[in-house]
Image (cartoon, rainbow, N blue to C red):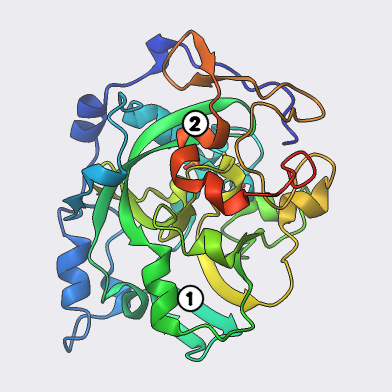
């Protein structure tokens, strides 16, 4: 990333989740309830709340039992360049982003292409909570209970054609609400991509919440990707377009610095970033560094996707 040295958070700066939650004035509307009622007369997408509780069924089989990262770390120390390239700006500035109404367009090699409301996209999907590790290329990691569903379920619904080999995702471009987009730090809008089998992997998730709450804007509201075995930048936020392609998409970070950020970007302690080692990481909220695991600890589930590939070449 463009930031050379990730600044550390002192434990004294960390607000316990309970305290933080008491401070927030949440509308306690359940997104699930609202979505169930979204088709009713009088209830439109414009009534989608910006914060509130989500009903989700826990999925222990896809969850780690490691200690959760404090809520404050996960929601106040973010990478979201659309709101600036430092870690604290997204939490300060993302409040101005209008996340409702929200539309998502499904394009390319797919039978049911079109522009859909967020409610149309979400309605058939039951929400699950999965506790995933996420490891940033800048050497910090976190453990967060995400709320969402498998991207595979959505992909199947929209019926990709046999030519669909990749999936490309695009973030909203709205400089009037995303001040970082007024500067050409990156080639906006932010784009990411996955190979079809990566996108269809049961771990790959579309998230609408974390810690049982609707996603705070700084974490990618109203809908983002979470790919736990890849560096965090693959987990694109505030998605407005999903396009199925025959050609490998060019993602924003690869375009910006191809020698530093490849298309695959699997967490790999054996392949250093040109400017730093990837052998170790610091879990947000902890002092001591820990060893980075291949595929961020998900090797058993995902290494097979890359069998026979030279992961130094396809970094
Ligand atoms: N998505 C967009 N649109 N813009 C970004 O700058 N940053 C990425 C990823 N998704 C980013 C993005 C990076 S570098 C990381 S590490 C994760 O978001 C951070 O997610 P978090 O803020 O929820 O921890």
x and y, in percent, of residue 74 in the image = 41, 33
x and y, in percent, of residue 249 in the image = 72, 66
First in sequence: mark 2 vs mark 1: 2
**Residue 114 located left or right of residue 250:** left
x and y, in percent, of residue 115 in the image = 49, 85
**Residue 182 located left or right of residue 206:** right
Residue 69 sits in quarter: top left
Crowd around label 2: few <14 · some 14–19 · many ≥20 (10 Å): many
Quarter of the picture holding the C terminus: top right
Q: Residue at x 62, y 50 (%)?
A: 306
Question: Do we see residue 100 in this rendering?
Answer: no
Q: Under 8 Å from ligand 1: the CB of mark 1?
A: no
Distance (Cα) linking label 2 and label 1? 27 Å
Image: 31 above or below 37: above
- Relative depth, front residue between 140 and 311: 311
Q: Residue at x 51, y 34 (%)?
A: 296
- Relative depth, front residue between 224 and 52: 224
x and y, in percent, of residue 251 in the image = 71, 58
Name the element at disc 2. loop
Q: Which residue is mark 2?
A: 77
Image: 105 above or below 283: below
Disc assigned to residue 121 = none
Q: Under 8 Å from ligand 1: the CB of mark 2?
A: yes
- Relative depth, front residue between 43 and 124: 124
Image: 228 above or below 244: above
Name the element at disc 1. strand
Q: Which residue is mark 1?
A: 104
């Amino acid at each position: 990333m463009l930031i050379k040295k990730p600044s550390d958070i002192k434990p004294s700066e960390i607000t316990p989740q309970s305290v933080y939650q008491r401070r927030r004035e949440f509308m306690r509307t359940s997104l699930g309830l609202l979505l169930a009622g979204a088709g009713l007369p009088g209830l439109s997408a414009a009534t989608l709340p910006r914060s509130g509780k989500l009903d989700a069924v826990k999925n222990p089989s896809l969850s780690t039992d490691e200690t959760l990262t404090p809520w404050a770390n996960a929601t106040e120390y973010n990478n979201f360049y659309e709101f600036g390239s430092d870690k604290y700006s997204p939490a300060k500035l993302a409040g101005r982003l209008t996340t409702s109404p929200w539309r998502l367009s499904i394009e390319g090699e797919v039978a049911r292409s079109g522009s859909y409301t967020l409610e149309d996209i979400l309605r058939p999907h039951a929400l699950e909570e999965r506790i995933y590790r996420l490891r940033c290329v800048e050497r910090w990691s976190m453990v967060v209970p995400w709320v969402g569903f498998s991207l595979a379920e959505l992909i199947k619904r929209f019926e990709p054609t046999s030519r669909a080999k990749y999936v490309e995702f695009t973030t909203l471009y709205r400089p009037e609400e995303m001040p970082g987009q007024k500067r050409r730090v990156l080639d906006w809008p932010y784009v990411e991509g996955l190979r079809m089998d990566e996108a269809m992997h049961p771990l790959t998730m579309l998230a609408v919440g974390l810690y049982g709450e609707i996603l705070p804007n700084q974490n990618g509201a109203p809908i983002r990707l979470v790919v736990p075995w890849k560096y965090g930048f693959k987990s694109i936020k505030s998605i407005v377009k999903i396009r199925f392609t025959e050609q490998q998409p060019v993602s924003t970070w690869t375009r910006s610095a191809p020698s530093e950020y490849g298309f695959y970007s699997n967490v790999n302690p054996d392949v250093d970033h040109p400017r730093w080692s990837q052998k170790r990481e610091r879990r947000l909220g902890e002092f001591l560094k820990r060893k980075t695991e291949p595929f961020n600890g998900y090797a058993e589930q995902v290494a097979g996707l890359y069998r026979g590939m030279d992961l130094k070449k396809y970094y």
